[in-house]
Image (cartoon, rainbow, N blue to C red):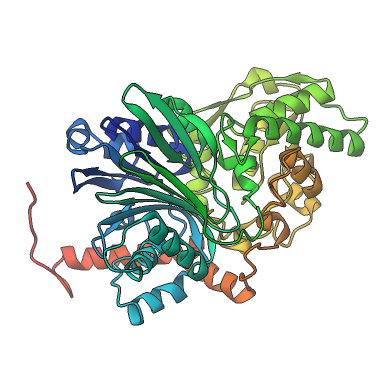
């Protein structure tokens, strides 16, 4: 899960890229980076941290040029190392910088081929670096000295043939322009925007349309599955579907949780989709609990507010804000380790006792992933004086890992995996629990947009649209990305660091940086 942006302008793009990343910060809070092309010189700044911490005034002043790309990261492959902050860069066959949102499901295979056959060097464990090198290699296979739209489209087509998984990409070719493309299934989002200026037309690509709204660009359209967009430095625009689309299957979790409600993805308003989720969830509650005694509906901020408002309206009960959110605490379900998530929930949310005291409360959330957050929120509601606490999820039970760019790697860490709804209800401590039905979720999101054939619902259904996700792959993923695996890596890192500091095995001379 990451945010990507690229701008080709007649003016310096540093501030625009920064502003776009600030708007897309919800998609990645661990690292950020910007690279710009200044008359053939690559200007770069990237580091772990929030956008506002990574880019200070002195850095912005050095990010010169009218063309650039940016990235904010939450790592779903590789590690948290600062060296894996994006964009990545290679200097052969051209200077190419690349930022990527998604996950490659065949990254291990690609890395081996890149090293053994393509003779490319990889510095990190990131699948984004592997993707960059595949793109660079395929560009190198085009006729010598030919950097044309035709050659670039051919290279992108080759990337589609070699890479599997979900990926939305923006790449900067130094001295030429920007290339953006999307996987043939359209799993991860990316869209194209346009802005009229006195100096001429300017273009922008970004993960979500809200970034374009913030910069005064008009949303033109979404980049299609398998399509590539080329924006040359003079503003010339080229597009081509480089691989036959293998369906139009965007990730449905974008609509449930990840995207901002003021975004439009694949011609579907996130806000409207969440309203419809609330309508269908309320209808299910009325079917299953026709004689409910709910006094008040309270959302778990922020992503469930829209659905909860419609649930309350449909049920004919009061809607109240019962929790106040500390906006400086990151998303809890993607935090590494149950204990960190547990500690963060109470720092993140504070209950308004008045809205809970002596009431039967229906809490509405967008989803229940690991269950830790839900469990603690229900405890907080009871501590605030609620008589009964009911719980409704705007999405179905999350039972399977999402492997296309969301950090849900281990089925064993998902509370609904191997449990019935009744057992989840008991685990989180609710008086009763209602999940959205998958068919209702699909109908709520799809609406009347005929272009989308289906959605990637793998985390709910276990059906992976790329067709290459085996039990063996999921087992390997769990070994690499589970909380336990992360904890073990962190322990090893600390031991190595301690040995080095103490002058133990592998100790290096201590240096002081000034």
Residue 121 visible in rendering: yes
Residue 268: horizontal and vertical position, in percent?
Answer: 65, 36
Residue 107: horizontal and vertical position, in percent?
Answer: 46, 69
Q: Is residue 114 above or below residue 4?
A: below
Q: Is residue 241 left or right of residue 55?
A: right
- Pick the residue in front: 184 or 240: 240
Q: How many marks?
A: 0
Quarter residue 232 falls in: top left
Give the residue displayed 28% in from the left and 47% down from the top.
47
Furthest residue to the bottom? Answer: 116
Give the residue displayed 76% in from the left and 18% down from the top.
318
Q: Is residue 464 left or right of residue 203?
A: right
Quarter residue 10 falls in: top left
Quarter residue 412 falls in: bottom right
Q: Is residue 301 above or below residue 224?
A: above
Residue 299 visible in rendering: no
Residue 132: horizontal and vertical position, in percent?
Answer: 36, 61
Give the residue displayed 69% in from the left and 46% down from the top.
451
- Pick the residue in front: 2 or 304: 2
Give the residue displayed 64% in from the left and 26% down from the top.
384
Q: Is residue 300 above or below residue 45?
A: above
Q: Is residue 298 left or right of residue 1?
A: right
- Pick the residue in front: 325 or 203: 203
Residue 95: horizontal and vertical position, in percent?
Answer: 25, 57
């Amino acid at each position: 899960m990451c945010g990507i942006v690229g701008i080709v302008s007649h003016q310096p793009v540093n501030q625009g890229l920064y502003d776009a990343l600030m708007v897309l910060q919800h998609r990645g809070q661990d690292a950020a980076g910007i690279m710009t092309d200044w008359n053939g010189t690559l200007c770069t700044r990237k580091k772990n941290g929030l956008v506002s911490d990574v880019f200070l005034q002195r850095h912005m002043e050095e990010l010169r040029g009218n063309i650039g790309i940016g990235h904010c990261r939450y790592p779903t492959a590789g590690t948290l190392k600062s060296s894996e902050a994006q964009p990545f860069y290679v200097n052969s066959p051209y200077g190419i910088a690349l930022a990527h949102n998604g996950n490659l499901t065949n990254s291990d295979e690609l890395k081996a081929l890149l090293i053994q056959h393509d003779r490319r060097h990889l510095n990190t464990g990131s699948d984004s670096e592997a993707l960059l090198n595949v793109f660079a290699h395929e560009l190198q296979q085009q006729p010598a000295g030919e950097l044309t739209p035709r050659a670039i489209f051919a290279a992108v087509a080759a990337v589609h043939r070699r890479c599997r998984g979900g990926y939305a990409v923006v790449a900067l070719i130094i001295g030429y322009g920007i290339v953006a493309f999307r996987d043939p299934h359209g799993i991860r989002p990316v869209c194209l925007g346009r802005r009229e200026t006195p100096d001429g037309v300017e273009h922008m690509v970004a993960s979500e349309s809200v970034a374009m709204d913030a910069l005064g660009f008009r949303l033109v359209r979404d980049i299609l599955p398998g399509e590539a967009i080329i924006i040359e430095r003079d503003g010339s625009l080229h597009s081509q579907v480089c691989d036959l689309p293998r369906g139009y299957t965007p990730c449905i979790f974008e609509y449930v949780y990840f995207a901002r409600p003021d975004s439009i993805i694949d011609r579907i308003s996130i806000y409207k989709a969440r309203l419809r989720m609330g309508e269908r969830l309320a209808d299910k509650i009325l079917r299953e609990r026709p004689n409910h005694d709910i006094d008040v509906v309270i959302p778990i901020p922020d992503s469930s507010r829209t659905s909860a408002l419609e649930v309350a309206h449909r049920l004919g009960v009061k809607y109240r804000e019962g929790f106040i959110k500390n906006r400086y605490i990151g998303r809890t379900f993607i935090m590494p380790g149950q204990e960190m998530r547990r500690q963060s929930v109470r720092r993140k949310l504070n209950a308004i006792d008045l809205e809970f005291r002596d009431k039967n409360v229906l809490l509405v959330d967008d989803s229940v992933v690991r269950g830790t957050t839900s469990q603690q929120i229900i405890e907080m509601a009871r501590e605030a004086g609620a008589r009964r606490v009911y719980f409704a999820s705007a999405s179905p039970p999350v039972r399977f890992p999402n492997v296309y760019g969301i950090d849900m790697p281990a089925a064993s860490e998902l509370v609904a995996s191997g449990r019935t709804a009744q057992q989840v209800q008991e685990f989180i401590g609710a008086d009763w629990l209602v999940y959205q039905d998958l068919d209702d979720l699909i109908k709520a999101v799809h609406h009347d947009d005929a272009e989308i054939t289906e959605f990637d619902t793998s985390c709910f259904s276990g059906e992976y649209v790329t067709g290459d996700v085996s039990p063996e792959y999921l087992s390997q993923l769990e070994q690499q990305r589970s909380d336990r695996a992360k904890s073990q890596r962190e322990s090893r890192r600390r031991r190595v660091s301690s040995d080095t500091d103490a002058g133990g095995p592998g100790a290096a001379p201590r240096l002081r940086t000034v």
